[in-house]
Image (spheres, rainbow, N blue to C red):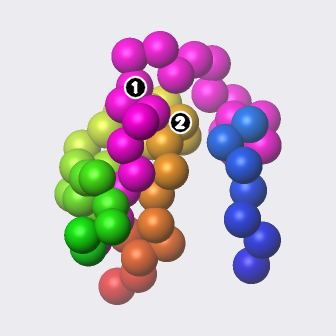
Amino acid sequence: MKKLSRSKLKEIKGATSCTGCPVQNNYGNGPEYSASCASYFALSQNCQMCVDVSADCFEN
C-alpha cells in the first residue's frame, strides 16, 4: 500500500483548511506517537484529513 502525502489527501478528501487543527501531532498507539488513536477519532473530519495517523488506528 502506498503512503499518501497530506497534500494528496487534501485533494482526494476536499479538505479546505487545516487552520486550528493540531497538525504538529502524529496519532497512533505507542510511545512513538504524540497522541492516541482515541484523540484522532475525537478530531473533526476536516482535522482528521490534516494530521498524520498510523494505520494501526484503523485495524480491529
Q: Is residue 5 left or right of residue 45?
A: right
Q: Give, as a three-letter code, the residue at label 1.
A: Cys
Question: Which SS does the magenta portion mostly show?
Answer: loop
Residue 58 visible somewhere in the drawing: no
Percent of width and height locating residue 39: 23, 49
Residue highlighted by disc 2: 50
| Tag 2 secondary structure | loop
Q: Which residue is at a point 46% across and 66% down the rendered structure image?
A: 54
Location of the C terminus (image quadrant): bottom left
Looking at this rendering, what residue extends furthest in the front direction? 32
- Few, some or many residues within 10 Å of mark 1 (<14, 14–19, 20+): some
Q: Is residue 36 left or right of residue 22?
A: left
Residue 34 visible somewhere in the drawing: yes
Q: Is residue 23 magenta?
A: yes
Q: Give, as a three-letter code, the residue at label 2.
A: Cys
Q: Which residue is at a point 78% across and 43% down the rendered structure image?
A: 8
| Tag 1 secondary structure | loop
Q: Is residue 6 left or right of residue 24?
A: right
Q: Which residues are magenta?
A: 8-29
Residue highlighted by disc 1: 21
Percent of width and height locating residue 2: 78, 71
Query: From what the image shows, is residue 50 above or below residue 17?
Result: below
Percent of width and height locating residue 5: 72, 49
Percent of width and height locating residue 17: 57, 17
Query: From what the image shows, is residue 42 above or below residue 1?
Result: above
Asked if marks 1 and 2 touch (Cβ < 8 Å), the reply is yes
How far, Cα to Cα, is label 1 from label 2? Answer: 7 Å
Query: From what the image shows, is residue 8 above or below residue 20?
Result: below
Q: Which residue is at a point 28% across and 53% down the rendered structure image?
A: 34
Location of the N terminus (image quadrant): bottom right
- Few, some or many residues within 10 Å of mark 2 (<14, 14–19, 20+): many
Q: Earlier in the sequence, mark 1 or mark 2?
A: 1
